[in-house]
């Protein structure tokens, strides 16, 4: 995959992170980086430039002598590698590395091509620095986690290489590479920027969109299993309120339920209106679809932006600004977290409708006889309720908080890194809830057979049938839900994620 700082997509980000696609830098970028480096070197001979020949943050007024510039960059990396907590998933670190690399390819950071090439080489050889998940406040960039990546680049700290955590120096050597020696500004350029929140948030957004498509089919299966009406999906209703996501979801639902024998069997029933969790899927899922799309637009813009400071322009000007501030990303990550949480709320309520004997005409908790002796899937609604509740807490906006840092020099921060991590947890919970709904809708639909649902729903029904045994009596059901989640992720084109999440 060719990168040039301008055209990286979330799909490509996911493919490099999870499918280990190789990366190559556009040849024109190399020439641009060389030119801008010369500008920086000339400008710094006569002018004071933040982070090049000065200290950092509140220490920006401290001038650094020419002989100490390389030491300054090394010290910056080591002192800022202050992360803590669990080690971040390797694939997410890969995403972060790609985002930082692509941003540097814009040529506005004033660093040598060798630094960018070194990042690409580490990605392609799968030498991935160990990065603790906690420590970034999301302004002055994601300093701490990016410092851990930079530390790996200079041969310090630890890296994951071929399934083994070893010293970075040794990992780089085994991969046939050499540690990079950072010159003026290069440590700062590696640490500045929003790559942590944008890398994790970008992967989460892409995965959410892919899984969302399967969740629509699952919801349609629930509608038919619960003998719901298709009238609320009539195109005329949605043309009267023309939100794009709402129109799209209603179309998909109509397509899924087209030709359903189950629906045709109760067209003239006495039910006037279904519960909201069936009737308003287009309105709720449609709004979620629009939120995902908006988040995608913002993050794709971000991962193709220069988020360094200062920036070096084509006339040699070195200008300090604030593109490292994570607010644009932090806000949409919170927005998407709220949207996915609400999607889980609706899914949990449909799960209850599928198993609750007070709300349907199906066997209690989808048992096949001897109720009481067998509890069926009763407790999986509890699980869904627990996950939905957990997501509600996680959905509290990270960006609503700010804590001053660096002696009040950096007195407003985005907290976007925490927003990204929370979004990832919400997404994991949501995927589990989708798998629970899918399996329970499958079981419920089985009670409607031999009448058939729509072709796409029956296709999903068959795929689930292939991986779960028939229910005869109570047993441990956990493996069934994992198998169904694997089906969902494979259908979504996320096989690599499935292997990571499910461990198969």
Image (cartoon, rainbow, N blue to C red):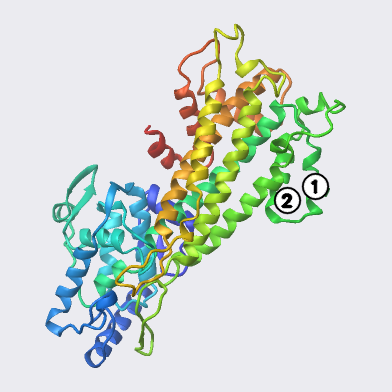
**What x and y, as percent, mark residue 2?**
40, 63
Q: Is residue 494 visible?
A: no
**What x and y, as percent, mark residue 86?**
29, 46
In what quadrant of the picture does the C terminus appear? top left
Marks 1,2: beta carbons within 8 A: yes
Q: Which SS class for mark 2?
A: helix
Establish if 211 lies above or below 463.
below
In what quadrant of the picture does the N terminus appear? bottom left
Depth check: 76 or 460 in front? Answer: 76
Q: Earlier in the sequence, mark 1 or mark 2?
A: 1
How many residues crowd around disc 1 within 10 Å: few (fewer than 14), some, or many (20 or more)? some
Residue, far left: 67
Q: Position of 88 compared to 459: left or right?
A: left
Establish if 31 lies above or below 354.
below
**What x and y, as percent, mark residue 4?**
41, 69
- Residue tagged by mark 1? 235
The residue sitting at 57% across, 40% down in the picture is 344
Q: Is residue 40 visible?
A: yes
* Count of numbered badges drawn on the protein: 2
Establish if 445 lies above or below 333.
above
The residue sitting at 45% across, 39% down in the picture is 495
**Disc sitting over residue 247 in the figure:** 2
Q: Quadrant of residue 223?
A: top right
**Disc sitting over residue 46 in the figure:** none
**What x and y, as percent, mark residue 163?**
24, 42
Q: Quadrant of residue 411?
A: bottom left
Q: Position of 124 compared to 282: left or right?
A: left
The residue sitting at 70% across, 55% down in the picture is 244
């Amino acid at each position: 995959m060719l990168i040039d700082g301008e055209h990286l997509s979330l799909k490509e980000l996911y493919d490099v992170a999870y499918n280990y696609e190789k990366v190559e830098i556009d040849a024109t970028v190399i020439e641009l980086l060389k030119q801008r480096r010369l500008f920086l070197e000339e400008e710094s001979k006569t002018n004071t430039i933040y982070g090049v020949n000065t200290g950092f943050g509140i220490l920006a007024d401290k001038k650094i002598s020419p002989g100490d510039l390389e030491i300054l960059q090394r010290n910056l990396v080591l002192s800022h590698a202050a992360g803590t907590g669990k080690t971040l998933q390797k694939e997410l670190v890969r995403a972060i590395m790609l985002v930082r690399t692509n941003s540097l390819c814009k040529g506005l950071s004033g660093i040598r091509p060798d630094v960018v090439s070194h990042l690409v080489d580490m990605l392609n050889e799968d030498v991935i620095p160990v990065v603790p998940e906690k420590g970034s406040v999301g302004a002055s960039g994601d300093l701490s986690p990016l410092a851990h990546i930079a530390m790996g680049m200079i041969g310090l700290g630890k890296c994951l290489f071929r399934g083994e955590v070893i010293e970075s120096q040794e990992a780089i050597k085994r991969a046939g590479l050499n540690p990079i020696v950072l010159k003026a500004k290069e440590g700062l350029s590696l640490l500045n920027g929003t790559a942590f929140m944008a890398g994790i948030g970008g992967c989460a957004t892409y995965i959410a969109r892919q899984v969302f498509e399967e969740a629509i089919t699952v919801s349609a299966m629930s509608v038919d299993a619960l003998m719901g009406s298709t009238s609320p999906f009539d195109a005329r209703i949605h043309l009267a309120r023309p939100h794009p996501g709402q129109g799209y979801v209603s179309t998909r639902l109509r397509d899924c339920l087209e030709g359903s024998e189950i629906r045709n069997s109760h067209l003239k029933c006495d039910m006037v209106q279904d519960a909201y969790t069936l009737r308003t899927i287009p309105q709720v899922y449609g709004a979620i679809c629009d939120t995902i799309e908006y988040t995608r637009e913002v993050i794709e813009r971000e991962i193709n932006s220069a988020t360094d400071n200062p920036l070096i322009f084509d006339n040699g000007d070195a200008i300090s600004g604030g593109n490292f501030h994570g607010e644009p990303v932090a806000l949409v990550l919170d927005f998407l977290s709220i949207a996915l949480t609400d999607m889980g709320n609706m899914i949990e309520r449909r799960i209850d409708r599928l198993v609750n004997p007070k709300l349907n005409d199906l066997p209690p908790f989808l048992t096949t006889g001897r109720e009481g002796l067998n509890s069926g899937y009763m407790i999986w609604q509890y699980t869904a309720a627990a996950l939905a509740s957990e997501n509600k807490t996680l959905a509290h906006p990270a960006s609503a908080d700010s804590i001053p840092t660096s002696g009040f020099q950096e007195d407003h921060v985005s907290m976007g890194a925490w927003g990204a991590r929370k979004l990832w947890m919400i997404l994991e919970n949501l995927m589990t809830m989708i798998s629970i709904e899918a399996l329970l809708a499958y079981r419920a639909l089985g009670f409607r057979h031999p009448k058939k649902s729509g072709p796409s729903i029956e296709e999903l029904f068959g795929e689930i049938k292939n991986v779960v045994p028939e229910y005869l009596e109570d047993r441990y059901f956990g493996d069934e839900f994992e198998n169904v989640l694997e089906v969902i992720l494979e259908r979504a084109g996320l096989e690599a994620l499935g292997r990571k999440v499910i461990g198969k």
